[in-house]
Amino acid sequence: MGLLIKYTDASIVRQESVILKNVDLEVNKGDFVYAIGKVGSGKSTLLKSIYADIPVEDGTANVLNYDLRNIKRKQIPYLRRKIGIVFQDFQLLIDRSVNDNLEFVLKATGWSKTSEIKDRINSVLAQVGMQTKGYKMPHQLSGGEQQRVVIARALLNSPEIILADEPTGNLDPDTGAMIAGLLYEISKMGTAVIMSTHNHHLTKEFPGRVLLFENQIIEEVKPIIVAQKE
């Protein structure tokens, strides 16, 4: 299937406190993975460890052929270029248009040809159904539209993995389901998606793997079990 992430008996520590332990995780190309659990159970911590923002202690952790236990600081930007990140609070630059937000990211990651930049922006906006909104400022968009732009931003460098940290948390249920569906379709095209969420209904609407975070442990469970726990 194409192994992208492999953690074996890993521990993840923040400020000398163990957040997750005995982590065994494999994620393959095209996987759609939910991370569920209470606030503070380690969902965001795992995602941040994947893009080397939080260190992995003990065990082994490999992401896109980078050894996270021994990754060098200068290698981290190259790892992150292969990973798209979708934040709950959008983190768009409010003083520039959608197109300019996306252009900023492309130029920051080494794109220089104006025609290629324009083509790539048009391509990702079309992929998320925002091809006519590139001229708008973030405040002129609804929450759902802003999150679509954030997903477009995550797609700019054709990532092998998308990490979505509560992407539906600030959206109404219908809009949240639309955003989850968009990420689900992206996974069908081969990009692995890991999405943390408190909305367990999504696991039935868009079937995928479900990781339950509880008592410092990650356990893979069946979606129907999650639905019954509500």
Image (tube, rainbow, N blue to C red):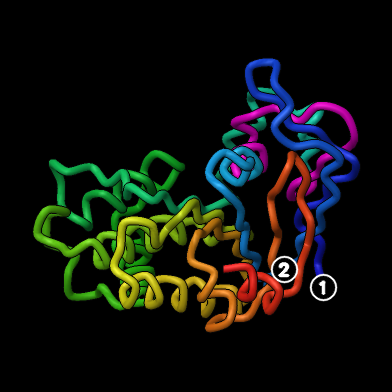
Of residue 20 and residue 114, the one placed in the foreground of this image is 20
Of residue 105 and residue 61, the one placed in the foreground of this image is 61
Query: Which element is circle 1 on?
Result: loop
Mark 1 is surrounded, within 10 Å at the Cα level, by few (under 14), some (14 to 19) or many (20 or more) other residues, namely few
The residue drawn where x is 64% and y is 75% is: 228
Q: Residue 1 has which mark? A: 1
Horizontal and vertical percent position of residue 127 = 39, 76
The residue drawn where x is 46% and y is 72% is: 180
Q: Earlier in the sequence, mark 2 or mark 1?
A: 1
Horizontal and vertical percent position of residue 95 = 13, 41
Q: Residue 56 in magenta?
A: yes
What kind of residue is marked 1?
Met
Q: Which residues are magenta?
A: 47-65
Q: Number of callouts in the render?
A: 2
Q: Are marks 2 and 1 in contact (CB under 8 Å)?
A: yes
Horizontal and vertical percent position of residue 21 = 81, 36
Of residue 117 and residue 45, the one placed in the foreground of this image is 45
What kind of residue is marked 2?
Lys
The residue drawn where x is 49% and y is 71% is: 183
